[in-house]
Image (cartoon, helix red, strand yellow):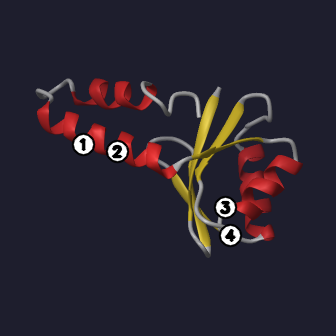
Amino acid sequence: MKIIGIDMSKDTFHAAFDETEVIIFQNTVSGINEFIQEMIARGCTKNEIAIGTEATGVYHLLFCEKLRADGWLIKVINPLITHRLIGASLRQVKLAPAGRNQTTRSGSRTQGPGRGT
């Protein structure tokens, strides 16, 4: 299953379709519809995609409800988990010898309490 990461804010959201490409959309019904059309244009299907976003007060609610109602798989992530993973990743990168950084960072994202969310 492919995961699309969303960084949500009051007015916009950033969609990370892969590790190098991020597209910014308006956090409105029309912006969310543009995001859905972008996913479809990229060949994303409801059976192959999970969309992950942090809980951000109320800012993520419209996005989550619209996509859920349309049948997309949404994973709302506790911000404490993502902050722990980022902190662990940064510490490991500083300590890891050259060449092992990518493996170390990847491993920290798939282990621990946030796994599968």
Horizontal and vertical percent position of residue 30: 79, 69
Horizontal and vertical percent position of residue 19: 45, 42
Q: Which residue is mark 4?
A: 27
User: Do the numbered discs 4 and 2 sit on residues whose CB atoms are within 8 Å?
Assistant: no
User: Do the numbered discs 2 and 3 sit on residues whose CB atoms are within 8 Å?
Assistant: no
Q: Is residue 29 above or below residue 55?
A: below
Disc 4 packing (10 Å; few <14; some 14–19; many ≥20): many
Q: Residue at x 59, y 34 (%)?
A: 117
Q: In this rendering, would 98 be left or right of 45?
A: left
Horizontal and vertical percent position of residue 52: 61, 44
Disc number lying in front (4 or 2):
2
User: Do the numbered discs 2 and 1 sit on residues whose CB atoms are within 8 Å?
Assistant: yes
Under circle 1, the secondary element is: helix
Name which residue type carries label 1: Leu
Q: In this rendering, would 109 be left or right of 23?
A: left
Q: Residue at x 14, y 39 (%)?
A: 94
Q: Which residue is mark 1?
A: 90
Residue 86 is labelled as: 2
User: Do the numbered discs 3 and 4 sit on residues whose CB atoms are within 8 Å?
Assistant: no
Q: Which residue is mark 3?
A: 60
Disc 2 packing (10 Å; few <14; some 14–19; many ≥20): some
Name which residue type carries label 4: Asn
User: Do the numbered discs 1 and 4 sit on residues whose CB atoms are within 8 Å?
Assistant: no
What is the C-alpha distance between the residues marked 3 and 1? 26 Å
Q: Nearer the viewer, residue 12 or 54?
A: 54
Residue 67 is labelled as: none
